Image: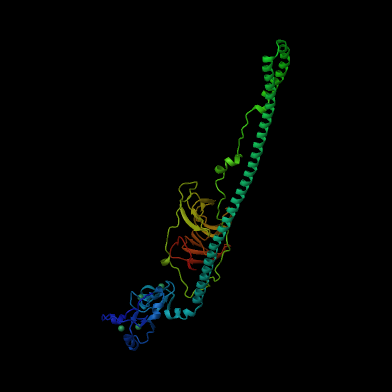
Amino acid sequence: MASSVPICDICMTDIITKPASVWCSECEEAICYGCERQHGRMGLTKNHTTLPIKDYQKLPSSVAAIKEKCIGHSLRFDFYCVIHNEPCCMSCVLEKHGTCQKVKPLSEVMEGVKSSAAFADLEDRTKDISALIVDLITDKQNKQANFGVQKTKIISEVQNVKAAINNHLIKLEKDLLDELDKVEKKQNENIENFIKKLSKMLKKVENICGDLEKTKQHASNFQAFLGIHEWNKRIEIEEKEWMSLQTDQITNTFDIHIEFAPILTKFEKDVKELGNLEVKSSSSKKTPLNKEKQGQIFVPIFYTVDNIKLTNIRSFKTPNGASRNMLITGIDMFDDGSIVLADQSSNKRLAIVNQEGEHIKTIQLEDKCIDVAVIDKDTIATTLVERKNIVIVDVHSSKVHRNIHTSDKCGGITYTGEQLVVSLHNKTIQLFDFSGNALSTLSTADFPGYCSSFNDQL
Ligand SMILES: [Zn+2]
Ligand SMILES: [Zn+2]
Ligand SMILES: [Zn+2]
Ligand SMILES: [Zn+2]
């Protein structure tokens, strides 16, 4: 869409720039106020309808760019060729569309276009898909807000788990410290009791020691002699006591140690994460279009060989047969994209390859075949040239459903959706129904070789 006001194309020829006030789509010129008066009076242009320049500027650029005149012939488009799907001027019709059977007056094909069902249908479908897109955006935005809620929830769950682990650790710590207190107390008690026992022994031994000292100083030899026996008994008791202490555990050295639960020493190594974050997808309800494209469009579009563009989608090697000298002379495609090949060589076979070009099946035939036609996903027809036979075969069991005899050697075959069409060496094309009944025979100038159907035409 142009942003500034266009200048008058007529004045521009005199190198005068004046802002245009209207647009004449027939002249394809912007016209200023002054020139507009002349344009409205002159014989050739007085019937031209003009459009205020403001409105012209509102047109989508793709629509504004549509020329109303033939560039090649500088003539008005007055016709429309439905076969080529293009507007044409008188000269175009003569030069290019002479054989086209569907050239119509432009006024006829475009009459009532804005109020047509096709235009309304376009508007409806545009509004429909636009509403669906808006809904989907809103839905996705809501989902975005949900992520925030989910994140907050997970954060609080993580904190809960951490708190639970912490609380458990605190409890375990308290239990252990309580236990430690008890163990320490018990060990102290044991040692205190032992010291008491030793102190008693010490007292007895010191008494004996004191008695011996005093006897040595003050008693007679006779007294000392008789006393030895008595002291010997007393010291022996203490010695026995001492010896028995040697086997008592109480003389061992006691230390308090801790051995941690194995899981705790491995905690850091084994527990690498608190949890595993995962984005789960669940399929949501599919939203089909509310407005399906309505049957017939305003001007039907015909596809012709001219407007078919070829692109290589994939290539594959033809599958080897028993004989390496294969000769592929016929091909057809199933709806699912798998392909059947007719191998005319001594292999006498139909070979089926899947969408990826992998050989998935061979159907062995009784004789050499020329061409093959897919009838439906389970059935194919092939021409056995020498036998003058069309053979209808079940794809899965490889069994022959039906033999249809032809009046001469048969070559190319095609299935129109209703009829089998076969070209024969006797310069005819024969049409059969699926049951094998001959419907009609067309004569051709020469052996037609192959045949195919397109838009109800052979
Ligand atoms: Zn002007
Ligand atoms: Zn004009
Ligand atoms: Zn033309
Ligand atoms: Zn045409």
Location of residue 357 in the rendering, given as x and y in whole percent from the top left corner: 49, 52
Front residue of 310/17: it is 17
* Residue farthest to the bottom, as pictured: 41
Identify the colour scheme used. rainbow
21 with respect to 416 (left or right): left
Q: Quadrant of residue 153?
A: bottom right
Location of residue 123 in the rendering, given as x and y in whole percent from the top left corner: 50, 75
Q: Quadrant of residue 36?
A: bottom left
Front residue of 33/458: it is 33
Q: Quadrant of residue 8?
A: bottom left
Location of residue 421 in the rendering, given as x and y in whole percent from the top left corner: 51, 63
Q: The N terminus appears in which quarter of the rendering?
A: bottom left
Question: What count of labels does the image hold?
Answer: 0
Is residue 342 in sight in this rendering? yes
Location of residue 265 in the rendering, given as x and y in whole percent from the top left corner: 57, 40
Could you tell me which residue is drawn at 62 percent across and 49 percent down?
Answer: 167
Is residue 389 in sight in this rendering? no
172 with respect to 356 (left or right): right
* Residue farthest to the top, as pictured: 222
Front residue of 17/426: it is 17
106 with respect to 13 (left or right): right
Front residue of 2/311: it is 2
Ligand 3 located in image quadrant: bottom left
* Residue farthest to the front, as pictured: 218
Position of 168 relative to 394 (above/below):
above
Position of 197 relative to 46 (above/below):
above
